[in-house]
Amino acid sequence: MSILIDSVYKFFAFRYNVFKDIFIHYFGTVRNRKDFTPMSQSTFGKKFTVTTWGESHGKALGTVVDGVPAGLFLTEADIQTYLDRRKPGQSRYTTARNEGDEVEILSGIFEGQTTGTPISMIVRNKDQRSRDYGNIAQTYRPGHADFGFDSKYGFRDYRGGGRSSGRETIGRVAAGAIAARILKELGITLQAYTSSIGPVSCQSYHPEIIPENSFYMPDMVAAEKAAKYLEKCMKEEDSAGGVVECRISGVPAGIGDPVFGKLDAAFAQALMSIGAVKAVEIGDGVKVSTMKGSENNDGFHMENGRIVKTTNHSGGILGGISDGGEILLRAHIKPTPSIAQPQQTVTTTGENTSIEIKGRHDPVIVPRAVVVVESMAAITLVDAMFSNMSARMDYVRDFYL
């Protein structure tokens, strides 16, 4: 019930005119418009917070990252390495939009080190072609957020999807680069990759070849098959979906909370917040529903003085808390909704029509989503680890005494 009430409140808060009319009807005159500040839920995290801003065809996009400890060595080059992995135009299987996605750090860095204050970063848009979207200004695109956006706000930026565009993830990736830098200092590494595209799945795992193919797949045979499958989709003016996996190594046991703040729940929220993700799995995921307890349970044993697991069906998390094993995340990504085939839809005035999406679009967004998944995983883990620092009195005592 509390979730429903909260959702209704947020709906009305975004539509100020609706909320104002209801408030006046029930409670009298609104005294001060500032009492009704809309919240767009553009901030993620509690101790390590990330706020993204900007639209696909606006002047720029960016992010503000707060909670970064002072003294972390960080440069624009560290951020750019991550952004280069998601920028368009990397291959014939990505959009032809010509964006360098060059990042500029505006605050929070002095002489190559973080200052402990908010880090603000900006990436300017340089190759917008808003004219490509003129035919959808009064038409809802199937598979896109257009109708939902209009229903919520009563207004939408139709140029490339505006705030719901995949370019919003620029801010996530820039912030993720910082989070990954923090984790590296703690001996924790992340590796995300494409595990499948359409019906083509990886049958082997060779991390060294991930950057050597257009799809970021750890299996070159699968990458070649995926290319053939996408060529077929492109000829048919269609698109494909797929799965991104992320492995996180070096995470100590004890991170996360046992009830509403479960680590796996946090990862699920983070990955599901990525626009095209429709399902998330952790460890064996949906397969556990078909397994027996004797098959699903991970045994323990001692190894070099440490408690380790004999298997990892849990994906590194038990009871919402990390168990010291490798964390395995899996994000299922839908096909690119922008396709050139005729599709049935309606106009904003309620008239039936058909639409063919024009413009520059990815036939598959999975490869460019790899670094987005990795970034959100890094952000989530840093936030959880920072929150965990006050979980035990001995942690606090060791820090201050």
Image (cartoon, grey):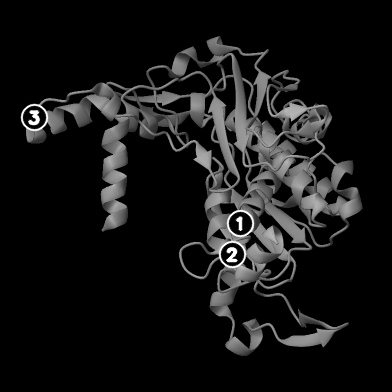
Residue 319 spot, x, y in % from top left? 56, 74
* Residue at point 71%, 45% (across, down): 179
Q: Are marks 3 and 2 in contact (CB under 8 Å)?
A: no
Q: CA distance from mark 1 to mark 3?
A: 43 Å
Q: Looking at the picture, which amino acid does disc 2 mark?
A: Gly
- Residue 351, image x and y in percent? 28, 23
Residue at 8 percent across and 31 percent down: it is 25
Q: Is residue 131 above or below residue 181?
A: above
Query: Which residue, given by chain and number where applicable, does mark 3 sit on?
Result: 28
Can the viewer see residue 384? yes
Instruction: Say what secondary structure mark 3 lies in.
Output: loop
Pointers 2 and 1 in contact (C-beta within 8 Å): yes
Question: What's the CA distance linking mark 2 and mark 1?
Answer: 6 Å
Circle 1 Cα neighbour tier, 10 Å, few/some/many (<14 / 14–19 / ≥20): many
Question: Label 1: which residue?
Answer: 384
Q: Between disc 3 and disc 2, whose residue precedes?
A: 3
Q: Quadrant of residue 122?
A: top right
Left or right: where does residue 354 sit relative to residue 104?
left
Q: Say which amino acid is labelled 1.
A: Ala
Give the amino acid type for the residue marked by disc 3 in the picture: Gly
On the image, the x and y values in percent for residue 106 come to 68, 21
Neighbourhood count class around disc 3 (C-alpha, 10 Å): few under 14, some 14–19, many 20 upward = few
Residue 108 percent across, percent down from the top left:
69, 29
**Relative to 24, is 271 above or below?**
below
Q: Quadrant of residue 125?
A: top right
* Mark 1: secondary structure: helix
Which residue has dot 2 on it?
256
The tag earlier along the polypeptide, 2 or 1, is 2
